Image: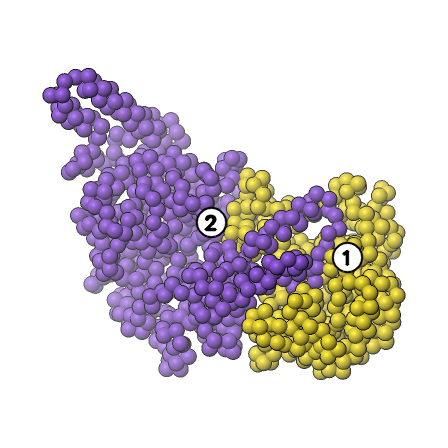
Chain colours: A purple, B yellow
Amino acid sequence: MSPLTFNIIRQTTQRSAARRGTLVMSNSGTMNSSSTETNDDSTSASKRAIETPGCFMYSVKGSVPHLTPDTLRLQDFGGVHISMEHLLQDHQPNGFEKWPSQLTISKYLNLQDMIVLCDIRDPSKFVKAPLNSDRFVSMMTHQGVRQLTMEEYLKVVRVYQPDIITTFADNVSDPLEPGQKRIRKSIERSLKWLDLVLAERQGYDAVSHDRALEEAKKKEKKEKKEKRKAESQGNDSDNEQDSAVTTSNIATNDYPAPALGAPEARNAAQTAKPWTNVSVFAHVIGSQIEQERIRSAVETSKRSEVDGFVIDTNIIGGSKDEVFGHLKTSINHLPAEKPRLVYGMQAPEDILRSIAVGADLFDTSYPFQLTEDGKASLYSFGSSATLSPFETQLYHSTSGTNRWINLWDDEHVDKFVPLLEGCECYACKDGRHSRAYIGHLLRTHEMLATVLLMSHNMHQYSKFFACVRESIQDGSFDRHAKEFHDQFGVEPKPTGQLHAAQAAVEASISRRNRLDDEPGKEGSSTTRADSKDASTEGNRKKKPRGSFVNKKELKLEKQKLRQQQAAQKEDQEPTQNA
Amino acid sequence: MKSALTWDVVAKCSTTKGRAAVLNLPHGPVNAPVFMPVGTQGTLKGITPQQVEGLGCQIMLNNTYHLGLRPGQELLDTCGGAHKFQGWNRNLLTDSGGFQMVSLLKLAEITEDGVQFESPHDGSLMLLTPEHSMSLQNSIGADIMMQLDDVVSSLTTGPRVEEAMWRSIRWLDRCIKAHSKPESQNLFAIIQGGLDPELRKKCIEEMVKRDTPGYAIGGLSGGEEKDKFWRVVTLCTDQMPREKPIYCMGVGYAEDLVVCVALGVDMFDCVFPTRTARFGNALTSTGTLGLRQSKFKDDFGPIEEGCDCITCKTYTRSYLHTIVTRETVGCHLVSIHNTSYQLRLMRQIRESIIEDRFPQFIHKFFKDLFKEKSAYPEWAVNALRSVNVDLLKDE
């Protein structure tokens, strides 16, 4: 039995399909609560629930960006989303050579008190990846495109033992509307993979069995082909038909639904260790074709062992309205009692619209993106959303929106007020940090800027969701959703350009780096490491991740470390101040 | 001159010149010997003020030159100083900006009047005079402020060194005169004189006459030979008044801290622990770990066994290997560990002095760090021998 339960507490009976629920991970199903673990595990584990509508925290390489474990715990989200493509190095994640048997991904990442969901792709954005095949799905690691096979995926699942995994899916990521044939193929493939994953979870050697079958078929086909060659030309067509029937259990054209539980995947030997403590969320796909979306939703729903569903709207092309239409189509054909996780709906108004069609779970890439842009959230939902005229005037900044302020804007440099008056986040609480200070941190390229902004933006996002849940509970969701729209409009389209002040800072940093690159300045360049953290170009669109490290400094540091370790010689360099 | 501190020596090492003391400053007590982490721009490299406090840090550095450029004096006055600006309720020490004469030399021109800097941000010129430095530091409101000194690289020789020494004395007089809040902020003099013992002695003699609340040894840690470095340090601590705190600027490598405490220094600062953290280097009692090295990817131990920082309590070397230099969280975690390591080292030194087992501590420290006696740096052996600790002999 799956350790995951999803309870719907309240379903709106008005126009929208919004619903309020709780996703809970019970501990009894966890095989890995090993005896070596300390008892703080059991206490923290009691909190393992996500109130829905709610979020998994978006992470990069297993860490919620900018937040150390203590600041992370100030946030009120119950789960974390992990993307395998961030963690895979070469052919497997770090540590797999000697991974201790009782170690789980939750413990490795210090997230034992969270529900950890592990997917393959990054949910925050659309990244075109090369095509998938019967053998693998493609993904973007920091080392470039990598192909993940089912065997590797299952190994990661067995080793990591996350609370929830999403299935291996052939999500067609071509914005230029892939043809119906390709979409159909992707659904067929994904369903087959889903059956394999579900069988593997029960301990069947489904994948190796499937591979053996494939090999046998290939061999058969090859033999027939040779036979055919040897035979006369007249018999050709008959043979082809034969092989079509034997090579595919699922006919390509109007394929019959595979039976519940997909017994053919379970013809395999049941010799592997089951991992029933891991819940499985299945990707529901179908691109832009309604009929195919329905097919995917209906067929996936037939697998009763599936614990929840994922709908990635990042990869659906078309207008917003069209995308919402597709989302709605999928959700309408999913069983009501299971949770639905949606990717690609990030801005608050998109969240509200998705909730209205019945979505339950999202990720926090929106507050992360605001943070990267130097913005601080002001929006709110429900009765607290009404701003006084003074506040409206205060908040209505040059950025032309009242949903956030941009701390790069000059108007904040002398504002010794919190990001948002009355906010209880780490940055704002007790007037601890002002807009002026955070603007200063941005301008001096100091990493605390994003720490504080992330704390604030994440806090506001979770508060938004809490108010949404409350409104579903008391039946005011539809009304408040409309008010939200009236009050805060829609997210301004990203320009893709850096804020002028940010561009100036980055240009100045790169100018200083150029100064340092001149010969004879080595000594001083290392002393200035603290104030010149990045080697970025002036007008680049996006700040590269990890920009706090500059290659030349890295080289110097490497040299120094070598020297130090080799002889611990007295090669002290100027380190006073900075 | 007036002083806003008290200096209570708690214990003296019976072998070396080391001492344990409490330095009482306007924003609370500081246990000395002390290492002061450097938050140049009013922040300690991604670590929140609460986290810094949680590490047991009682005093942090800011930089006058940098804060003077951004946010600038006017805003510092508006918000009531750097403590309020950065949400830090414990002590602050500000360097005068003199060091930037060396580090930003290309951008600086030195005259009797002061130092002319070219802003690296917009190319505008800023003249930093002793008066301006004091005025800025009064606006910042640091508990300890440093005089503007004429810093020359410790590799410089010839008349420029002597010129800088005399100018530093003249600038000290101007600083004292310009300092508007001696009752709430302590001005420290900075001893100059390069590597020349006679110049150092002369400088100390003159500066002690000015009777500032504390003294700093400046102009070192500029790439000079370590054998010369320690001789200047010990000469200064011998000549300086023992009833006041002594601060050695820019020193932060663990072995340097241990040796300098034995030579009688009470206060240190260095960007090294946080800077090296950003490159994925973690400090431990057995040496530096370059966490980027692939050997750590399968290492499921903490950075240092027994360390009580949140990094060591929660993450393995394997995971840190995955994120250092790639994720800001990786930087924060290693910075937290390294700062925690430095502060713990100073606490251990202090405790060993109080319990009068500092020489034993020194022996163990060098054994842990260098393993073999043959690997002990010669300068450290010599320096410690001068204060009656022979590292090469068994305890």
B92 relative position to A167: left or right: right
Q: Identify residue type, mark 2.
A: Lys
Mark-to-mark CA distance, 2 and 1: 42 Å
Please tell me which residue lies in front, A339 or A62: A62
Q: Amino acid at mark 1?
A: Glu
**Image x and y of residue A541, in percent:** 42, 61
Does A136 sit above or below residue A392? above
Image quarter where the N terminus of chain B lies is: bottom right
User: A30 and A197: which one is in front?
Assistant: A197
Please tell me in which quadrant of the rendered image residue B54 appears.
bottom right
Residue B280 picture location, percent across and down: 59, 50
Counting from the top left corner in percent of width and height, residue B25 is at: 72, 71
Residue identifier under label 2: A61
**Chain bearing mark 2:** A
Residue A464: which numbered mark, if any?
none
Q: Residue pushed farthest front?
A: A519
Q: Residue B224, which numbered label?
A: 1
In which quarter of the view is residue A405 placed? Answer: bottom left
